[in-house]
Image (cartoon, coloured by chain):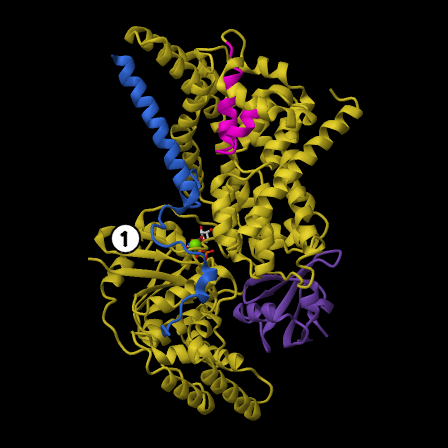
Chain colours: A blue, B yellow, C purple
Amino acid sequence: MISWVIGIVIFGYAAWTLIQHARKSYKGKCAACELRKYCEEDCESPNNYNDKNLLGK
Amino acid sequence: MNATFALIGNPNTGKTSLFNALTGSYQYVGNWSGVTVEKKVGTLHHNMGTLVDLPGIYTMNPISADEAVVSNYLLEEPTTPVLNIIDTSQLKRNLHVTIQLLERNRNVLLCLNMIDVANERGIYVDNNRLSSLLNIDVTPIIARKEQGIDNIFHGLNQLHKSTTPLVLYYGSIVEKGITSIEKKLSDLNGDINTRWLAIQYLQGNRQIENKLSSSNCEIAKIRDDTEKQLQFKEGNITLAYHIMNVRETFIQSIVDQVITIKKEPKVFMSEKIDQIVTNKFLGIPIFLFLMYMIFMVTFNWIGFPLSDLLDVFLTDMVAVWFENVLAILQVNPFIESVILEGIIGGVGGVLVFTPQIFILFFCLSLLEDSGYMARITVVMDRFMQAMGLNGKAFIPLIIGFGCNVPGIMAARSIEQERDRLITMVMLPFMSCSARLPVYALFISVFFKENQALIALSLYVLGIVIALLLAKILTSTTFKKEKSLFIMELPPYRMPQWRTLWRATWEKGKGFIRKAGTFIFGGSVIIWLLTYMGPGGIDVPMDESYLAQIGAYIAPFLAPLGFGTWQAASSLLTGFLAKEVVVSTMSIIYAAPEVQMQGLLAEYFSPLTAYGFMTFILLYVPCLATVAVMKQETHSIKWTMFAILYGLVMAYIVTFLIIQCGRILGIA
Amino acid sequence: MNIAQLKENEVAIVECFSTVDQLIKDRLMQLGIYPNQEICLLRKLPFGGPCIIGTCGQCICIRLYDAKGIEVKKK
Ligand SMILES: Nc1nc2c(ncn2[C@@H]2O[C@H](COP(=O)(O)OP(=O)(O)OP(=O)(O)O)[C@@H](O)[C@H]2O)c(=O)[nH]1
Ligand SMILES: [Mg+2]
């Protein structure tokens, strides 16, 4: 019984961490550096400033 | 309250230091211009709303990509109140940004930072006078000591009253230009101050040119006419220079009224250090020596002994404790095995190298916070010029030793797109801290005597391969443009223990977090793959799924000297993250009696071990690096190129090392 | 005469930019180096390496090529 509980916890957690890791990586967030934590909003690269036009035309 | 405030000011004036003090967060602080390269959002203390930290700017016309972030922000958030930080010891230069902000609107709180530095130089500023001259609130602070922070909260509370923006008179010709442009912009909806927009446009602000592209022809013509008239009257000067000059005159009149200089300038500490560090002949040797010292400390002197202690602690105490607990709980053998071999083996195998990681991060923080970073760019520029790049590229590269992701971001502060792109493509070859456990493991087995030297050689090899790439690119694709270099050298600052500790801890913590998350997950899965095989469960390791997968790839690695399934599958797991290579090896090479170190020595020789480390160094960037590279280069082509170049170089270089070694008779 | 011809620790006044690259020129202006400003050549690195110049208590490093493009007159 206890084996089952431990087993489920371990494998469940393992799967979750790996999915999280893949998701974060695709966003270009390094798992280690919390450096980008505060940038919850758009961290768009500045090059695309040409895209938008202020006058909306 | 849900107000938002933005931090604006010159580079390296302490914006992020203040951000950290006001929000209690920890963002990257360093003593050079261009540390912050993107927008960061934090929550202010006392429920005052949110604060936005931005890169530094000298004027609102952006040159580099990080400055473009600020100009963009100012355009998109025309009403956000601004906290303008100023380096008091450089008042005149800093006020240019203030004037431009005030021309936009007067929702500005002026913070005179670095009062301590200014006073030391004998510069004293009359706050009240400055406040009444500019008609805004002024608070003196010392951000790094968190002095005067309360006044800022007080000042922010008062900010919302909006008064008329500052109006400077630019002379009749320019004023006429401004008015006609303003008319053209009258259909512009929103709260943007059109006069400010017009002045910025006349001054040649690229960002604003882009934004106004639809009515470009008409206003471009106005600008040309204005410039021509101006040149007709005043001689050969540009419009931008004229506008700057008007501001300069205004600033000078303010500065004359508010500044008192009490001491004659003397030779400062900074200058004395610079005489040695950027010495004509000693500059580069000192840099190399410092790098060598970093590796001596990280590996030989402190790192290795500590990591040995940790190893003993993990195997003798933690593992034994778990064994006992599991025995009491009477779990089945499967669970016992996953915990003892998979988790403790895999995660513990990586965790033992925590000391090295922390020490390396500490040394890097020391470089970053002291001001030496900017000097590295100076001493290395001549060499980088020969490579077709500029010395500034060294800043992202050195940051990349910690982690490639912020390294690629840091390249934003390089002014030219060309140099920036090349630097980003070079970055994956900077040996990041994730690769360090692999070196630490092999070095502790095969190269006990020369740990620092071997580690240093790998880091240098990474740089050499990256420079080779730079040289190839700058003499082919990017041949037409030449690189440029200009760098501001900040005064040295004594790093504070608190900052150093925070910086080291914040980065080192990430390593421990990784161990608890996906290194854990990876270890469990890898263990499962070694436990199961086509023949069922609990199969001998050589018949496991992992062995089978590895065996497919092993033949390709045979010419490199490590054509075993073990090496092959370790490398495969490294695609996920480099640290997992160590977990995999700890799981695969774990045997009941002998230590992993002993088994490793059976499968590798010092030569193939070095080859393996080289391969790990070069073969593939981690997923996160690939993702930011794509985001920052806006180019799948360049991203793919970087990956392929790495893979090819890894194979060639490792092959050469192994074959040359064999010819030379090294086992 | 240009900046590169100054001796170390010699002070001079900037007259004009001649062959300086536009981007560098923009940056120099932003950093407070433009005509009529006082500057001091602090150091020249060997093998045609960069020059460190000082103005108003700040240090700026530029390449030799650009230093040669900044005309100055001695005080
Ligand atoms: N002496 C002194 N040093 C300070 C003060 N405030 C900040 N510093 C130091 O100045 C350096 C720059 O600080 P940052 O907060 O990174 O500056 P920043 O404005 O965010 O810089 P960028 O992001 O590059 O634009 C760091 O080394 C700080 O420790 C201060 O009030 N006095
Ligand atoms: Mg900053």
* Image point (52%, 13%), residue name: B543
On the image, which quarter does residue C5 sit in?
Answer: bottom right
Dot 1, how many residues are within 10 Å of its Cα: few (below 14), some (14-19), or many (20+)? many
Q: Is residue B584 one of those drawn in magenta?
A: yes
* Image point (64%, 34%), residue name: B458
Of the four image quadrants, the one with ligand 2 is: bottom left
- Image coordinates of residue B468 in percent, x first then y, are 69, 46
The subunit carrying tag 1 is B
- Image coordinates of residue B370 in percent, x first then y, are 52, 47
Q: Judge whether B37 appears above or below A37 on screen.
A: below
Q: Is residue C62 one of those drawn in magenta?
A: no
Q: Is mark 1 within 8 Å of ligand 1?
A: no
Q: Look at the magenta stretch and give its main secondary structure.
A: helix
Q: Does dot 1 land on a helix, a strand or a loop?
A: loop
| Residue B160 visible in the displayed image | yes
Residue where numbered disc 1 is placed: B44
On the image, which quarter does residue B49 sit in?
Answer: bottom left
Q: Amino acid at mark 1?
A: Leu
Between B519 and B134, the residue placed more toward the observer is: B519
Please provide the residue range marked out in magenta. Answer: B568-591
- Left or right: residue B395 versus residue B35 is right
Q: Judge whether B253 appears above or below B32 on screen.
A: below
- Image coordinates of residue B121 in percent, x first then y, are 49, 61
Between B195 and B470, the residue placed more toward the observer is: B470
